[in-house]
Image (cartoon, coloured by chain):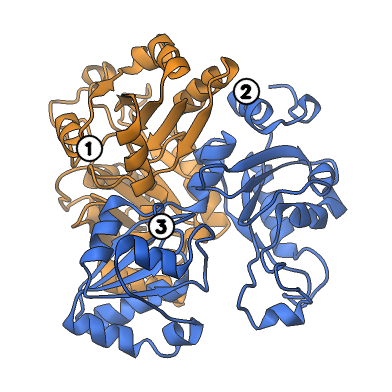
Chain colours: A blue, B orange
Amino acid sequence: MLTFIGLGLYDERSVTVEGQDALRAADRVFAEFYTSRLVGSSVDELEAYHGVDIEVRDRAGVEQEPEPVLAAAEEEDVAFLTAGDTMISTTHVDLRLRAHKRGVDTRVIHGVSAQSAAAGLTGLQNYRFGKATTLPFPGAHGGDDVPASVIDTIEANRERGLHTLVYLDIKVDDPTADAAGLAEGEEYMTGEYAAELLAEGWADELAVVVGRAGSPEPVVVADRLSALAEREFGAPLHLLVIPAAPHHLEADALRELAGAPAALLGDQ
Amino acid sequence: MLTFIGLGLYDERSVTVEGQDALRAADRVFAEFYTSRLVGSSVDELEAYHGVDIEVRDRAGVEQEPEPVLAAAEEEDVAFLTAGDTMISTTHVDLRLRAHKRGVDTRVIHGVSAQSAAAGLTGLQNYRFGKATTLPFPGAHGGDDVPASVIDTIEANRERGLHTLVYLDIKVDDPTADAAGLAEGEEYMTGEYAAELLAEGWADELAVVVGRAGSPEPVVVADRLSALAEREFGAPLHLLVIPAAPHHLEADALRELAGAPAALLGDQ
């Protein structure tokens, strides 16, 4: 049996009770932290809190050498942990299919996703979010600018009156971080840096930075991209949301809860 | 202090550990179950499992008479529970803003959403979902057909190569259920019924029914809408997903995990 468990957004208590019960009951617990991270807990803290040993697999250990995980799941109850929700990465789907083809039962225990948090913390309505996109570090995608795919997604959503969640690049333990010129401590793209990149074309557009979603003290700030670029939002992870024209209640929420300047909120 | 807590998708263990800790520590616990439901737990079971008393508020008790909740939150630590994620309904955002304007601190503890489950269980990639929509019971929206807004959303997503999550109407304890001609036990729209409605225009289109997302034994079936209309997917809740042309790994997942006929999966 192979149970995929999403650990949620922040620390050892972000997992669901069902997920906690399943990971504690497992005979072996594997995890990968290269597709996403729990910034509020180390692996040691996770192990201590849940009273389990966690075998962390790197990218090669999941994608090129899944055999130890699959072989264990044929014999025992195996949990496979990921930060955030599970099945977000194609890697997880691929591993599930490999298990399925070997006749191993699989189960998915969902975790809270960044999309839930982006809507919940900003007050922007969940059903008004369009396709999400990821903003990579310049240099990491072979260019110095914001990729056309990011611009296109934001514009296509806006044309339909939809908000865009922009995931910000993470290059921790990533061999391409050096190539992108990132120093130690700079491998999580910050909201201020993302705002600076996007402000080149859209200085006066309204955006929202969400810092440390899922933590006890998240930060939510709405302002012009050029103004957000001048702020500092502290420890990672950060998300950026580019709203479409907000509805009345959304505008209230952005003003009251995120400090949006009234001039940016239009006439609702 | 007013803490909004999403209980997750299915039963008393679908909440996060953090949410469980917060609701157990609260001085008073309010809940509403008219915007969504936990089908795997009754209120009594929730109270017994978490060792708390839950004061359930109906629609009028949240929207027209929020005063008791707000007054309590001025004096004590108050938890406000909802099924699924919190802040999905404008009602929750409105209540949060009312608290904020009275100087009451608020906090949001996210729950697993149906969107996470729809992607996680089908193997369809999360980032390829466009705007979601809700399919209402015929008669409930003043017409006998599928509303144009539902068709438009599915078609606009498909044009952009995006999947659509279709939420299915719930009319439990809803005074309009009688008007819509729904008998006892029929107030949750089923996947087979939704497929029948949509099959009128799209008989041969690929769709996926997800039953009991978040439960230990969810059902996931992919087939033509006309074929799904002939099946029975058992106890609620059900969701429907209309995929865009699936990528290679998505097609594998729909075939292996959801039984999709190969003829519907195109050439990836």
Query: The disc numbered 1 marks a residue on which chain?
Result: B
Instruction: Determine whether A167 is above or below B14 in the image.
Output: below
Q: Position of residue B171 (x, y in %)?
A: 26, 27
The local crowd at label 1, few if under 14, some if 14 to 19, many if 20 or more residues have their Cα within 10 Å, is some
Residue at image mark 2:
A248
Question: Which numbered dot is residue B12?
Answer: none
**Label 3 neighbour load within 10 Å: few <14, some 14-19, many 20+:** many
Between the C-alphas of marks 2 and 3, the distance is: 37 Å
The amino acid type, in three-letter code, at marker 2 is: His
Q: CA distance from mark 1 to mark 2?
A: 37 Å
Q: Is residue B115 above or below residue B222?
A: above
Instruction: Using residue A152 as the reference point, say whether residue B210 is left or right of it.
Output: left
- Which corner quadrant of the image does residue B218 belong to? bottom left
Q: Is residue A186 visible?
A: yes
Query: Disc 3 designates what residue?
Result: A12
Could you tell me residue A146's position as x and y percent? 78, 63
The residue at the point 28 percent across, 61 percent down is B223
**Residue on which the image places disc 1:** B50
Tell me which residue sits at (68%, 27%) in the image: A255
Local packing at callout 2 (Cα closer than 10 Å; few below 14, some 14-19, many 20+) is few
Check disc 3 and give the amino acid type.
Answer: Glu
Q: Secondary structure at mark 2?
A: helix
Q: What residue is shown at x 32% (from left), y 53% (from top)?
A: B203
Q: Residue A31, how many percent across, how many down? A: 40, 73
Q: Where residue B245 sits: x, y (%)?
A: 46, 65
In this view, the residue in front, B27 or B183, is: B27
Comparing B112 with B36, the one in front is B112
Which of the image's four quarters has the N terminus of chain A? bottom left
Query: Could you tell which of marks 2 and 3 lies nearer the N-terminus?
Result: 3
Asked if labels 3 and 2 touch by Cβ distance under 8 angstroms, the answer is no
Quadrant of the rendered image containing residue A87: bottom left
Give SS at disc 1.
helix
